[in-house]
Amino acid sequence: MNSDAVTKTSPHRALFHALGLTNEEIERPLIGIVSSKNDIVPGHMNLDKIVDAVKLGVAMAGGTPLVFPAIAVCDGLAMGHQGMKYSLVTRELIADSTEAMTLAHAFDALVMVPNCDKNVPGLLMAAARLNIPTIFVSGGPMLAGKVDGQKISFSNVSEAVSEYQAGKITKEKLQEYENKGCPTCGSCSGMYTANSMNCLTEVLGMGLKGNGTIPAVYSARIQLAKHAGMQIMELLKQTIRPRDIMTKDAFENALTLDMALGCSTNSMLHLPAIAHECGIELDLDIANAISDKTPNLCHLAPAGHNFVEELDEAGGIYAVMNEVNKLGLLKTDIITCSGKTVGENIAGCINKNTEVIRPVENPYSKTGGIAVLKGNLAPDSCVVKRSAVAPEMLKHEGPAKVFDCEEDAMQAINSGQIVSGDVVVIRYEGPKGGPGMREMLNPTSAIMGHGLGESVALITDGRFSGATRGAAIGHVSPEAAVGGNIALIENGDIIQIDIMANEINFKVSDSELEKRRAAWKPRKPRITTGYLSRYAAAVTSGNKGAILE
């Protein structure tokens, strides 16, 4: 075992005795439990209970559980200020520090306990790098809030702010949204990035049934954690490692369910980065091919009025997988952390609510929930959550209103400078330009709150929160900071968007484009010290482990 390096010599054993471990515990496999618990992230405040349950499961199955931490940022709290520049970079910090702790202490296997946006992909990346037996158990989704008999979530609170500023609701109603929008611990209750990645972890085969959907406050979540603790000992016994599970077929399964579920567009950043750590290059060009044959079966908030708790009641991720596989779209003979194949896992997992999980014969759309667009505005690619776009905005043409940062765009939206038909362009917010690739929930929420969600599009080289809805097109590549064409757009240029055709362009002649390119000058980075600037440099030097543009 790996742990022989630290359990077979007296000096090492002396340090274990200092921890209070008995000889019996030292002789057992050492199982690292990576805990993302902290007191600032609502999705992580309950992870101590999950970790305790995992420890019990490991001990019951004959292992010695030893906990070490991973940092976590709440994207909601980081939103709208310089803190958001640091959110995405924590994914790399989490992966790096977990790798360091695991190798330094010679763990035999790992149980990862994440929940929110960057912890899940960061720990999946670490699992792939380390390639020792690993299993995931998340903290679970938050229950939805309720106002006036209607279920709500965090994104509704963000939109209520703009509704109040526009005079559509009272201050008292805004406060009611504030007080009731996030009623329990857990990852925010819609199909936002955290829940998207926890669900896709289950699809990849790295989490047991229910990992993505059992609510944080349910006792079933504690039971799941105990089973994860027990199962890691089975994976160790059978020598089943992450790269045995996270194969190319597994990633294609994840992309397929991504389309069926209508996950966050951030999954298009995280899945390729995780695959890269597995030695697999996941070309996003295949996303549209998968989307073309995968029906969108779920409209969870913000795309619709259902929440993850209802997806769980309807049968969870396995029920969606079973429904999708009626079309033969999944690779079912690949191994998972359960020790069984995908096919064995999903057998008999029926759809219990055809309003929450549409049958393949009656989908929300015949194509998937995410689309990758290309054109002269985004020569490499950009991404849109198609399932959250109003039908009338699937094809749109309008004049550009260009802003070089999120704050300037917010001021324009809230002051009434943005009108029906406009296309808001926010640039220099990419991995290098931000730096840090901020999420743009505030501008999209402001557009929705001002009643412009069905007539105004927003395009950025930053990214969008999973809570975003409307014609929000992000991850434009190449980004403005490296001279991408988004840097050459001028106010009034006509932007043409055709989501169903996967195209995005702006009307400008080749000669005019070359003239603008010759005149363009790079901007100085807004942050020039610390890990964030090194991360931005790594991105632009082609380090795909950091992020794929």
Image (tube, rainbow, N blue to C red):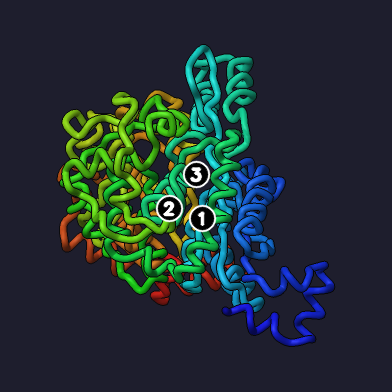
Q: Earlier in the sequence, mark 3 or mark 2?
A: 2
Compared with 461, 350 (above or below) is: above
Q: Is residue 214 left or right of residue 350?
A: right
Name the amino acid type tagged 3: Asp
Tag 2 near tag 1, CB within 8 Å: yes
Estimate how packed mark 2 is, as few (under 14), some (14 to 19) or many (20 or more) residues with alpha carbons within 10 Å. many
Q: Which is nearer the eye, 472 or 182?
A: 182
Q: Secondary structure at mark 1?
A: strand
Name the amino acid type tagged 2: Thr
The alpha-carbon separation of the residues under discs 1 and 3 comes to: 40 Å
Q: Is residue 199 visible?
A: yes
Residue 268: x and y in percent read: 35, 54
Where's the C terminus, which quadrant? bottom left
Q: Which residue is mark 2?
A: 201
The numbered dot on residue 136 is 1
**Residue at 41% across / 71% down in the picture?**
277
The alpha-carbon separation of the residues under discs 2 and 1 comes to: 8 Å
Compared with 279, 490 (above or below) is: above
Q: Earlier in the sequence, mark 1 or mark 3?
A: 1
Name the amino acid type tagged 1: Phe
Residue 317: x and y in percent read: 37, 41
Q: Which residue is mark 3?
A: 408
Q: Which is nearer the eye, 427 or 191?
A: 191
**Residue at 59% across / 30% down in the picture?**
182
The alpha-carbon separation of the residues under discs 3 and 2 comes to: 37 Å
Q: Is residue 167 left or right of residue 506?
A: right
Where's the N terminus, which quadrant? bottom right
